[in-house]
Image: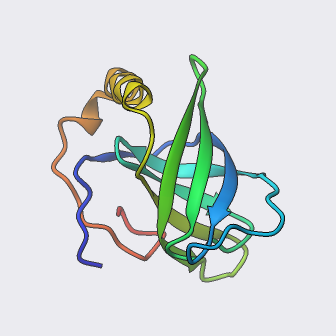
Amino acid sequence: MSEIRKSNRMFTRSEVVVKVLAVDGIPPQKVTPFYCHSSDLSIEGIRLVLDRELPPGAQVELIVVLLDPPASFRHMGVVRWHKASAEGQNKFAGIEFTASSPAVMAVWKRVLTERYPMISSMPAQRFAKDPDSAW
């Protein structure tokens, strides 16, 4: 993909609740939140490890729970890519935060840069569809 993240990522696990709000602009008939976790996160987005598919373009609401010390954040986002692992057991999705409140984003950025100083000091890397790459 040709997109470039504006900020760097930290390879860390956080617990995430996902609620799909719309696919192809159409709200789903039944909205059931589900649980998953991240494999990395950045100021502008997150890579999720899932047991199901999330179609690119889907609009989602995320509750991201960081541990040690605990903190939770509500983000609105869009699925930018989705891929299954080579074994097919896990699925991965790249989510870009799109409509999170400015107050939430300010605290998110502060917490991430305090907790993971390397996020603000590493050069930006390109997005990649391969979940094993350092996208």
With respect to residue 96, does 13 lie above or below?
A: above
Side (left or right) of 42 relative to 38: left
Which residue is more in the foreground, 44 or 115? 44
Which residue is more in the foreground, 56 or 128? 56
With respect to residue 84, does 118 lie above or below?
A: above
Which residue is more in the foreground, 106 or 5? 106
Rendered residue at 50%/73% (across/down) = 57
User: Which image quadrant is residue 121 in?
Assistant: top left
Rendered residue at 67%/74% (across/down) = 53
Side (left or right) of 74 relative to 109: right
With respect to residue 82, does 135 lie above or below?
A: above
The number of discs equals 0
Q: Residue 56 appears at what percent x and percent y?
A: 51, 75
Side (left or right) of 85 relative to 81: right
User: Which image quadrant is residue 30 in?
Assistant: bottom right
Rendered residue at 34%/22% (across/down) = 110
Q: Residue 108 appears at what percent x and percent y?
A: 41, 29
Rendered residue at 54%/66% (across/down) = 93
Q: Residue 91 appears at what percent x and percent y?
A: 64, 71
